[in-house]
Structure formats: C-alpha cells, structure tokens
Image (cartoon, rainbow, N blue to C red):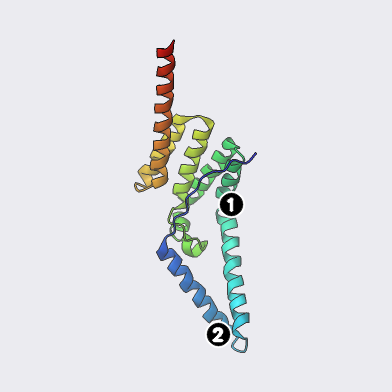
Amino acid sequence: MANRVQTTNRINWAFFAAQVILQALLVVLFTMLMPESDLTLVLVLAGGFYLTWSVFSKTLLFREHRQGVRLTLFERHDEAIKAFEQSYAFLSRSPWIDRLRWLVALDSSAIPYREMALCNIAYNYARKGDARQARAFYEQALSEFPHSEQARAGLKMIDDAIEEYRNQHSAQQNGQ
C-alpha cells in the first residue's frame, strides 16, 4: 500500500528564468533552422525538444533518485535507502550535474539532489524506526547544506517523537 509522503518543492527563480531564456533561444534556433515554417510549427518543435530533453535527462541522470522516491512511497525502506545512497554517490562523483541541473536536466528546484538524497535516506531510516541512523543522515545533510530546511524539520520530527515517547513512558511508570 502506498504511503503519502509530504514533499516540498521550492523553486530557484534564477534557474527558472534561465530555463525561460533557454526556451526562447530554442524558438529562435528552430526559426533560423526552418525560416519558411510558421510560428506554430516552430513552437511545437522547440517545445517538443525541450520536453524530450527534460524527460530524457532526468530519467538518465536521476534514475536512482526517482527509484528511491517510488520505493519510499511503497514503504520499501531498505531498498529506498540503497537507491538514495547510489544517487548521492553518483552526484558526489559528478557534482557539476547537481550544480548545473537547471541546464543539464532542466530542473528549477532550489534543493540540490544530494541534499534531497541525504534527507530521503534519513526519512527512510526514521520510517523504519531507526532514529540514530535518521539523525546521523539529517546531521550530515546539515553539515553539507547548512540551510537545509528539510534536515532541520527532520531533526525536529525525531526530537519531538523521542520527547513524546519519554512522556508516555514516564506517564506509564507514574501510573503503575
């Protein structure tokens, strides 16, 4: 059974603006390549090229990440952790892909995929009930990405759960 996982998708507006400019440049390029064609055909071809590039590059470059998201949704946490670890390792070996994701994958997300991978690993550990491992990965995310709102929220979630457990345990002991 699939689990609804809350996600955030902040947009880097500079990346978004660069993509709009890229789309305009594609229209100009297709217009120059096919000067006799009407504008509708040029727009369809430029849009089709842009869409194909986006889907193909994301499928190729972020395959493990996308697989990890699917596995998380179906609560297959051990497999999801492995997929996100592979994604993190790949992007750590090729950090330029994450830095230039607005161009390479036409992705305007403000959150780097490496940060997402670490937070998703931590989230999956938390869902498995392994608070120590979850905390370690959220702390690693904060170490590498000091402004990570996801990592801060994850650590707060863990601290709140531990506090709730302690309160319940204390109430049970006092009630006996």
Position in image of residue 40 (x %, y %):
61, 81
Q: Which mark is residue 120?
A: none
Residue found at x 62% / y 86%: 38
Q: How many marks?
A: 2
The first of marks 2 and 1 along the sequence is: 2
Q: Which residue, as the protein is rendered here, is positioned at the far bottom?
A: 36
Amino acid type, mark 2: Met
Res 13 quadrant in image: bottom left
Horizontal and vertical percent for residue 159?
39, 32
Residue farthest right in this picture: 1
Amino acid type indicated by mark 1: Arg
Q: Nearer the viewer, residue 95 or 52?
A: 52
Question: Eyeballing the image, is 103 above or below 164?
Answer: below
**Residue neighbourhood size for the residue with mark 1, other residues' Cα within 10 Å, grouped as few (<14), some (14–19), many (≥20):** some
Q: Quadrant of the C terminus?
A: top left
**Residue found at the far front of this picture:** 175
* Rendering coords of residue 23 (x, y %): 51, 73
Q: Which residue is mark 2?
A: 32
Q: Where 9 sits versus 48, above or below? A: above
Q: Quadrant of the N terminus?
A: top right
Between the residue at mark 2 and the residue at mark 1, the CA separation in whole angstroms equals 34 Å
Helix, strand or loop at disc 1? helix
Residue ID for mark 1: 63
Place of residue 43 in the rendered image (x, y in percent of width and height, measured from the top left)? 58, 78
Disc 2 + disc 1, Cβ < 8 Å = no
Q: Indicate the secondary structure of the residue bearing disc 2.
A: helix
Local crowd size for mark 2, using a 10 Å CA cut-off: few (<14), some (14–19), many (≥20): few
- The structure residue drawn at horizontal position 41% and vertical position 18%, both measured from the top left corner, is 171
